Amino acid sequence: MRKIVVLLTVFSAALLLQAKTLMLLDFESDADLKKIELTAEPIRVNPIEIGGIPGQDAVVNCDPIKDFDPSVLPYERVSENAASGKSSLKVTDKPKAGNIHFTGFPKDWTGYPYLKLDIFNPSGELASLVIVLTDSATRPDKRYTKSIGTYQTRADISKNLKPGMNSIVIELEGLANNEKLGQLDLSNIKKLAVDIQGKSYTLDNVRLDSEE
């Protein structure tokens, strides 16, 4: 009986340790590449930031949609700049490649107050990072192939990236969509996008964490 109690205690401790962090994307195998969707949607930013009209999308990457070619892959799994394990995802800005976003990861983020990721900025200057999250209420923009969703109904988070490796922490509790119409449904996160406004970067170790 004593041996059973000890085993149960060890098992319970292991479960608690496992629950502390939930890995979403680590790029240690090609399986994570299957979670990537290419989209013909132009990169968008908050229209107020560039003097646009509130409530309307502002297109800052105006490459014609007709030039989008889904056979041109802007990403590859590499061994450089891996923050965890041996591999990372290198994303390179290429003509006709469109943008990428991720899906197919665990969708229930409840119980994890922080989203964390490690991203390498190869340029020698500060870069603007935009992370986009969508939930079940996000409306797709039907004008574009596999749209990340309309600006108003998704959540955009902006961060500055210093040159080199950056460890990004995003607080999820109370995170609202861009129109502040409601909080993001953390029980049903559908898509995740990471972008550095037309620049190349390396991404790794995308995870949820119970501690900051």
Image: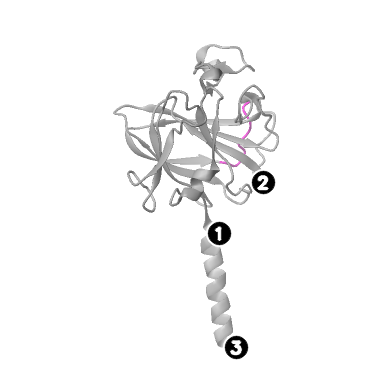
Which residue ends up furthest to the left in the rendered image? Answer: 124
Q: Which residue is drawn at 62% across and 35% down?
A: 134
- Image disc number at residue 73: none
Which mark lies nearer to you, 2 or 3?
Answer: 2
**Residue placed under numbered mark 1 in the picture:** 19
Specify whether 141 is left or right of 44. right
Q: How crowded is mark 1: few (under 14 residues within 10 Å), some or many (20 or more)?
A: some
Looking at the image, which is closer to me, 70 or 93? 70
Tell me how the rendering is colored. Answer: one colour
Establish if 197 lies above or below 172: above
Part of the protein shown in magenta? 172-178
Looking at the image, which is closer to me, 209 or 211? 209
Looking at the image, which is closer to me, 48 or 80? 80
**Residue placed under numbered mark 3 in the picture:** 1
Mark 2 to mark 3 CA distance (whole Å): 39 Å
Mark 2 to mark 1 CA distance (whole Å): 16 Å
Specify whether 109 is left or right of 116. right
Mark positioned earlier in the residue sequence (2 or 3): 3
**Residue placed under numbered mark 2 in the picture:** 187
Q: Residue 48 in the image: x percent, y percent?
A: 55, 16
**Local secondary structure at mark 2:** loop
- Please report contact status of discs 2 and 3: CB closer than 8 Å, yes or no: no
Q: Which residue is drawn at 53% across and 35% down?
A: 101
Mark positioned earlier in the residue sequence (3 or 1): 3
Q: Is residue 118 magenta?
A: no
Q: Residue at x 50, y 29 (%)?
A: 99
Q: Residue 21 in the image: x percent, y percent?
A: 51, 54
* Figure quadrant of residue 179: top right
Residue 25 visible from this viewpoint: no
**Local secondary structure at mark 1:** helix
Q: Is residue 176 magenta?
A: yes
